[in-house]
Image (cartoon, helix red, strand yellow):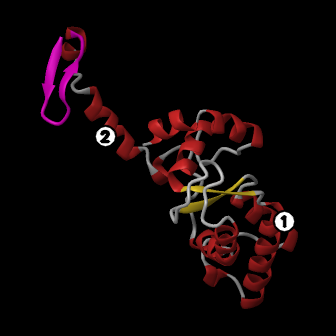
Amino acid sequence: MTIICPVHGKVKMTLFSLERGSRCKYCWYDRFARHQTGSKNPSWKGGVSPVILALRRCIDDWRYSLFNSSNHTCEITGEHTYNLVVHHMYSFADIVRMSSKETGIPLRRNINDYSEDEWKTLSECVVKNNELYADPIVMRADVHKAFHMFCGGFQKPTTHEQLNVFKEFIEFFLEKAG
């Protein structure tokens, strides 16, 4: 049978479900999603802390130099654009963790939790390790989103093999991500 939800319109459901008290499954998904986001989600890992954001700003010069050296061209599509991002084949989060371990300075949530010397040491190590290990690919922001969708999400590590397969089917994945 079909019911009419004031939010989602026509929704198919069984009479049995309606008799049990079920209503629009999409309203339930929306309500569930609101309660399962952020720190309420069992997969929550703390989100992006102010320290991670500040460490990302430390590599801005490196990013801008990559944009300039690529002549603001996406390495995947060959398109000249200013809507570029740098994809790390070796994740930035791993680079930060490696730098923390290398320096012996634990990762904290706020910059104010570090002494001036600790912050300088940690941020310089992140910049150095980023230049050594990032294996960067300059790409359009929407291509980057589609690539991560292809690989299973932004938290998943990516490989050059995945990138090569993605390049073969780029139009399909851009259409899905759009």
Quarter of the figure with residue 103: bottom right
82 in the magenta segment:
no
The residue carrying pointer 2 sits among few (fewer than 14), some (14 to 19) or many (20 or more) residues within 10 Å by Cα, namely: few
Spatial CA distance of label 2 from label 1 is 44 Å
Residue 107 or 6: which is nearer the viewer? 6
The residue carrying pointer 1 sits among few (fewer than 14), some (14 to 19) or many (20 or more) residues within 10 Å by Cα, namely: few
What residue lies at 24% left-to-right and 22% top-to-bottom?
22
Residue 47 or 75: which is nearer the viewer? 75
13 in the magenta segment:
yes
Q: Amino acid at mark 1?
A: Leu
- From the top left corner, tell me how far across and down residue 111 is, in percent: 63, 80
Quarter of the figure with residue 105: bottom right
What residue lies at 46% left-to-right and 36% top-to-bottom?
176
Q: Amino acid at mark 2?
A: Arg
- From the top left corner, tell me how far across and down residue 118 is, in percent: 77, 83
Residue 11 is labelled as none
Can the viewer see residue 141?
yes
Badge nearest the viewer, 2 or 1: 1
- Give the labeled residue for mark 2: 31
- From the top left corner, tell me how far across and down residue 127 is, in percent: 76, 74
Q: Earlier in the sequence, mark 2 or mark 1?
A: 2
- Give the labeled residue for mark 1: 132
Left of 178 or right of it: where is 69? right
Left of 75 or right of it: where is 30? left
Q: Which residues are magenta?
A: 1-14
